Amino acid sequence: MNIHTIADHLNSLADNSDTGMSFDCQPISGEVDVLQISILGREELPVFISVTEDQILCICYLWGTDEVKPECVNAMHESMLEMNIPMPLSSFSKIGDKYVVFGALSINSSFDDVEHELAVLSNNAVEVIDDMSEYLL
Amino acid sequence: MSIFKKIMTAIRGGASEAGEAIIDANATRIFEQEIRDAEHHLTKAKRDLTGVMAEQMAAKREIDRLTREITEHEGYAMQALEKGDETLAIAVAEKIANLESTLADQQHAHDSFSGSADRLKDLVKKSERQVAEHKRQLSMVKTTESVQKATSAITDNFSSSNSKLLSAKDSLERIKAKQQKFDDKMKAAELLDSEDSDTSLQAQLKAAGIGSQDNSANSVLERLKAKKK
């Protein structure tokens, strides 16, 4: 399992995904290979996949620290902690100055698992932004 | 300091900037080597354990055999005594004494093997836990580094493609607008479908001669003929 086999699989799905979503994959080269996945109709919120020795990480960037109303930071953090368990498959995190939702899969996961993860992560991201927009500028 | 704490401190300290490693690559390599060594020792300990357990079983078999033989000879000694053959009884008793001495030795060896086996089992368990723990820690370090490198690749890609990152709210607006457009299209399609079914109903009515009829050439001709009269 690497980003290229994942890309091949997602591209081969075309309109036949079980999740009702169409994925478009774009590899990004760098010190660590990353796969950028755009979901039809949600191009503004791409999901990034990187594969390490033991896990597959799927990350979706939510917003930057500069987008949070300063007086709401604590309340937002509390909401995120409280929502972390109810939110299916994904968790909140922060990379640098960006808040993210992410899911980590075992390297032994099937392509179906990856596809399911992407769909759930994307749905979570859209819903989180909608529900937490009161904290945002 | 635990790996967890180290990573936390490094991220807080701004090591999250691209190019700066959480724990230097050399330390990671040493750590990996340590894990490999530990795994190597573990394999050896497991092999030793198998050997010791085999010896332990052999000793147990020997003990059983000696015990059986002693009982047997005790029977012979009793029989010799019953027949009043004191000399033979003494000879058998000597044999029994020898057997008992060997039995004591075997018992001692068996106890020592069980002791070693127990110790090795504990050692194997402990090493297995340790290797798993080290692997978990190494995975934390590697994942942190990988995420940093991936982030810098993503950031570089964004800045090189000149695409502006939208704010979360703007992104949501756009996604919702697209969703709305899609929903509208679906609704329009449904509406068209239902209109189509209206037309088809009218066609059926017409075919049955119910409702308004077309102005066909025949009906025009009929009308003209009527005027002429």
Image (cartoon, rainbow, N blue to C red):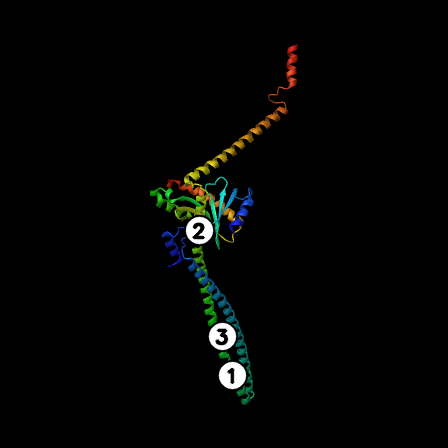
Is the C terminus of chain B in the top left, top right, bottom left or bottom right quadrant?
top right
Q: Residue type at mark 1?
A: Asn
Q: Amino acid at mark 2?
A: Lys
Q: Dividing the image into 4 quarters, which one contains the N terminus of chain B?
A: bottom left
Residue indicated by mark 3: B110
Q: Which residue is mark 1?
A: B98
Residue shown at the point (54%, 87%) measured from the top left: B91
The chain under label 2 reads B
Answer with mark 2 or mark 1, whichever residue precedes in sequence: 1
Crowdedness near tag 3: few (<14), some (14–19) or many (≥20) residues, C-alpha within 10 Å? many
Cα–Cα gap, marks 1 and 3: 18 Å
Residue B227 lies, in percent from the top left, at: 64, 11
Q: Nearer the viewer, residue A136 or B203?
A: A136
Nearer the observer, B87 or B171: B171
Q: Could you say where residue B101 lies in the image, as x and y percent from the top left?
A: 50, 81
Rendered residue at 48%/70% (across/down): B117
- Residue type beneath disc 3: His
Secondary structure, mark 1, is helix
Residue B44 in sight from this viewpoint: yes
Q: Relative to residue B203, is residue B124 depicted above or below?
A: below
Q: In the picture shown, does residue B121 fall above or below A24?
A: below
> Counting residues from the N terminus, which is met first, the one under dot 3 or under dot 2?
3
Secondary element at image label 2: helix
Q: Which residue is mark 2?
A: B149
Judged by depth in the image, the label closer to the viewer, 3 or 2, is 2
Q: Who is closer to the viewer here, A33 or B131?
A: A33
- Between the C-alphas of marks 2 and 1, the distance is 75 Å
Q: Is residue B118 above or below residue A132?
A: below
- Mark 1 neighbour class, 10 Å CA radius: few under 14, some 14 to 19, many 20 or more: few
| Mark 2 burial class by Cα count in 10 Å: few <14, some 14-19, many 20+ | many
Say if mark 2 contacts mark 1, CB within 8 Å: no
